[in-house]
Image (spheres, coloured by chain):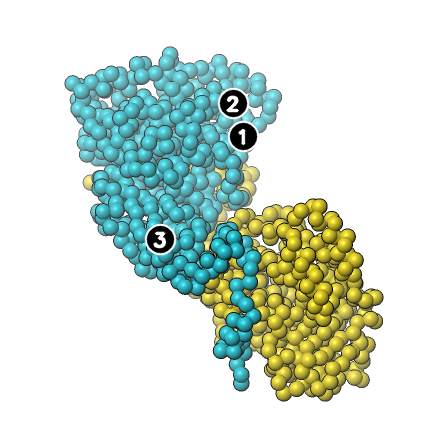
Chain colours: A yellow, B cyan
């Protein structure tokens, strides 16, 4: 980006795109203002922006934040709205200081492993965050939710209206939300894929979390406030306050879910409370959607507009992203229409402890812990673990899993019998209430956009079985000599066999045949 | 290592361990001088040395030299013989400036890919080098080869004696030498193993090379000069001028091969010429063994002593190293007697071009080139390549391979039909004259010491097939817009589908069912 152009245009632009209305910080209306949108596009087209960071063909930096969103910061700067960038980071530091900061802007933060297993519900402070733009800060008492399109009556509702139990019945739902990119890093490590402008973040197993959300079913709001939807309505589009960029165009974040999904009463709610506390800003305060069983992207945060539509949203997040391609589709031939839209999440699971490449010293059993989840209203029935790469499977005891929910994960724990030593391949698979289970290998379901890594999660552990006499003796010898077992790759500092023992062995089994 | 102790002892030590005799630079006799050996051990035991560099649990540095042999340099410094370190590096810079310097000391250098495929014979300048100690510099006219032990007559031969065709018949052999660690990096990447004091170098596919060696068969020398070996002789031990360290002891490099192997006349030779030129110092000048079909370690360089023995050499390189363990043996239970001795190399092969993770734009065929080799006197019969991870195999045309040799590789080339796009797994396997072929996966033959990576070599290529219309069109569009295809992960800078085309597609195949 040219520095000279940048600074000139920035001061101009900050007058052109001021905040929309009092109390709505970080909000600029684009969808209703075609002339502003066109002007922003003109400015963006006139500039060059840095490429997204390369982290697929190179190792991931060891820093925290891991990746820096230079490109999106430059977009904001070009329009003179870089205050959004600074304010977002302040909010992250207040609300989410302990996450793994995968990308600083738009903020993508992943839950650390030990916090993932603390209990069925993820603490608000530790719940993962995946944003597509800055974190706005809309004051609760000024928020107005506008519902329009193919409804019998267009309405504007205040948060007070929505929270009034006399007007709308409230519900509490236990819901697991998951980024469709959870465990993407496993795909990246094997085969780099689309970089995307707003990077396909290299998520591990922590882009998932569970909370109890309080709110009102969208179906009830549509019925009680709008007198229902028109017969042509097939989709509900949700629009968020946050600003989104795509190929030199600017948008408010927009996605949609089918009316059929919303109709199932308590499966799509407008929520303002998370685990008994007000929704954090990073999670969509003052009001967000919670769409059960769907990818997190559909649970629109900072929602201020809902449109009843005949077709799915044409917002780029809905139309152009979160598409599931076959392996024959890639940079050489992708189109939006040749991938299917990722809405419901399939059954998946992950081993959270131990971690990949750990050395485990044990006496015949290794304890594994993790999560298991299925979307689309399926619940988790059975979790199975293998210590041999997927040949023999051991089922987790039902007592060692958290309770069943229609829309939430189950945490699990198992003591797996392990005789073998050396590097072993542990993997997990889950069966859901529709008898779905997981693809076997990353390769089985690899796709260009690196979504939905639901293949059996695999880790390598180095097993040291002290119930084997030779192993027990070696550990004793090491202890006597003050030699630690790890790092595994450090050579033994003493000789593991004396000359007499060696010679005796060679007499019994000589190196070469005698004749 | 304590700096104070070091400097004091260094100056003492340099007087204690001077060079052995005039013209024998870099040579210190340890095997015949138990009192010197004991003193060196005492000095080494009194010091602490840096650990070998960690490169298995961390990414390999991008430097050249890639790894630095601090530990071995410190061993030499402790004994006041650090001149060996400096002289070795000077020789490397003279003789091997263009190798990949895997380890600077003891020098381990790997041939670069394009130099590997230049022809059936590897240029001396590019041939890989794997040393276990410093590179000595023994003047040709002072060299004396002593042959003793279970021979009928102990002799000392000058190089002039050996080179005299009236005394010994000369032969020329075309021989592939290979480090038993060739392709070790594939094992490391999947499962770290033993670090070893003199690191298990992270070799790629270039720790192999072929040359024509001129010399005399050892069998003839034993017969003509020593009057033959005694009936109890079962092994021939070769001792090199270079100094070797193992667990605070010091040795001259020593290995052995069976008498049965030597008896096969032209399979073990004493060589002084490589590809028609005098042997380079890095390759063992003035005299070395060339043991056909065996791991490179047995082809003792800078040889000055040969012992006829009843049992294999007890030198640590022979007794304690180059052992092949089952996967149940590791740091927790290794002994020298529970691995078998790696002498002959199995059948193996490698794809040299293209390289792993390359993007290949083609019109239905991809050209692959590589090497194939088998040890133990087996020759390469057939090379096969798969573009689907090992399901369908295409054989290399016999015209596209270099000629057969009993003891040398064949270079090969194939145009593989490729329809599929995206990430494909190419692999190669070779069949030898005993109908041996290669293990399927790294896992199939992984072993703690990370030796003999002979599993099917696998690479991932991103295939872009321009004989497919949609792909041809996309490449045209990219060219028209001046957008390069690579890096693969960089997002397309234009929209791959306009709204009309998308809407038409959605009408034919809507996102959700109609009912």
Q: Label 2 is found on which chain of the structure?
A: B
Observer-side mark, 3 or 1, equals 3
Q: Residue at x 49, y 78 (%)?
A: B508
- As drawn, the label of residue B78 is 2
- As drawn, the label of residue B366 is 3
Mark 2 neighbour density, 10 Å: few (under 14) some (14–19) many (20 or more): many
Residue A479 vs A382, above or below: the answer is above
Q: Secondary structure at mark 1?
A: loop
Q: Label 3 is found on which chain of the structure?
A: B
* Badge 3 and badge 2 in a common chain: yes
Q: Residue at x 44, y 50 (%)?
A: B358
N-terminal-most mark, 3 or 2: 2
Q: Is residue A296 left or right of residue B139?
A: right
* CA–CA distance in space, label 3 to label 1: 50 Å
Mark 1 sits on what residue? B49
Q: Residue at x 53, y 66 (%)?
A: B497
Which residue is nearer to you in this view: A123 or A422? A123
N-terminal-most mark, 3 or 1: 1
* Badge 3 and badge 1 in a common chain: yes
x%, y% of residue A40? 69, 60
């Amino acid at each position: 980006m040219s520095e000279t152009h940048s600074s000139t245009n920035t001061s101009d632009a900050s007058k052109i795109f001021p905040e929309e209305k009092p109390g709505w910080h970080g909000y600029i209306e684009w969808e209703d203002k075609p002339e502003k949108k066109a002007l922003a596009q003109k400015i963006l087209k006139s500039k060059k922006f840095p490429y997204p960071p390369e982290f697929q063909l190179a190792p991931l930096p060891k820093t925290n934040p891991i990746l820096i969103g230079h490109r999106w910061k430059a977009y904001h700067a070009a329009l003179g709205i870089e205050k959004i960038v600074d304010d977002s980071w302040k909010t992250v530091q207040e609300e989410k200081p302990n996450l793994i900061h995968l990308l600083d802007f738009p903020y993508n933060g992943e839950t650390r492993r030990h916090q993932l297993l603390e209990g069925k519900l993820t603490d608000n402070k530790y719940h993962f965050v995946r944003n597509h733009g800055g974190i706005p800060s809309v004051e609760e008492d000024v928020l107005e939710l506008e519902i329009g399109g193919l409804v019998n009556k267009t309405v504007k509702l205040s948060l007070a209206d929505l929270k009034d139990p006399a007007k709308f019945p409230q519900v509490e739902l236990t819901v697991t939300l998951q980024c469709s990119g959870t465990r993407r890093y496993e795909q990246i490590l094997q085969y780099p894929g689309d970089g995307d402008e707003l990077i396909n973040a290299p998520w591990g197993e922590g882009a998932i979390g569970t909370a109890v959300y309080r709110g009102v079913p969208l179906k009830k709001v549509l019925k009680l406030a709008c007198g229902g939807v028109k017969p042509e309505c097939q989709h509900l589009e949700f629009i968020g306050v946050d600003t989104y960029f795509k190929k030199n165009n600017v948008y408010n974040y927009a996605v949609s879910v089918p009316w059929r999904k919303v109709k199932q009463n308590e499966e799509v709610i407008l929520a303002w409370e998370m685990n008994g506390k007000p929704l954090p800003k990073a999670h969509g305060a003052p009001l967000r959607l919670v769409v059960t069983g769907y990818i997190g992207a559909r649970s629109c945060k900072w929602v201020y507009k809902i449109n009843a539509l005949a077709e799915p949203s044409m917002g780029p997040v809905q139309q152009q992203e979160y598409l599931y391609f076959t392996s024959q589709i890639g940079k050489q031939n992708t189109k939006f229409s040749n991938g299917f839209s990722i809405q419901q999440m399939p059954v998946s699971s992950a081993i959270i402890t131990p971690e990949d490449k750990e050395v485990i010293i044990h006496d015949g059993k290794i304890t594994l812990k993790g999560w298991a989840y299925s979307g689309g209203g399926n619940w988790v029935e059975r979790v199975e673990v293998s210590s041999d790469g997927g040949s023999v499977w051991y089922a987790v005891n039902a007592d060692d899993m958290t309770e069943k929910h229609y829309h939430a994960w189950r945490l699990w724990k198992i003591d797996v019998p392990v005789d073998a030593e050396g590097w072993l391949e542990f993997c997990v698979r889950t069966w859901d209430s529709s008898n779905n289970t997981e693809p076997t290998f990353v390769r089985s379901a690899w796709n260009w956009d690196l979504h939905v890594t639901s293949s059996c999660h695999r880790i390598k552990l180095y097993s040291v079985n002290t119930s084997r006499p030779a192993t027990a003796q070696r550990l004793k010898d090491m202890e006597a000599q003050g030699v630690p077992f790890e790092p595994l790759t450090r050579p033994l500092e003493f000789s593991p066999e004396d000359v007499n023992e060696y010679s005796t062995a060679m007499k019994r089994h000589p190196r070469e045949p005698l004749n």
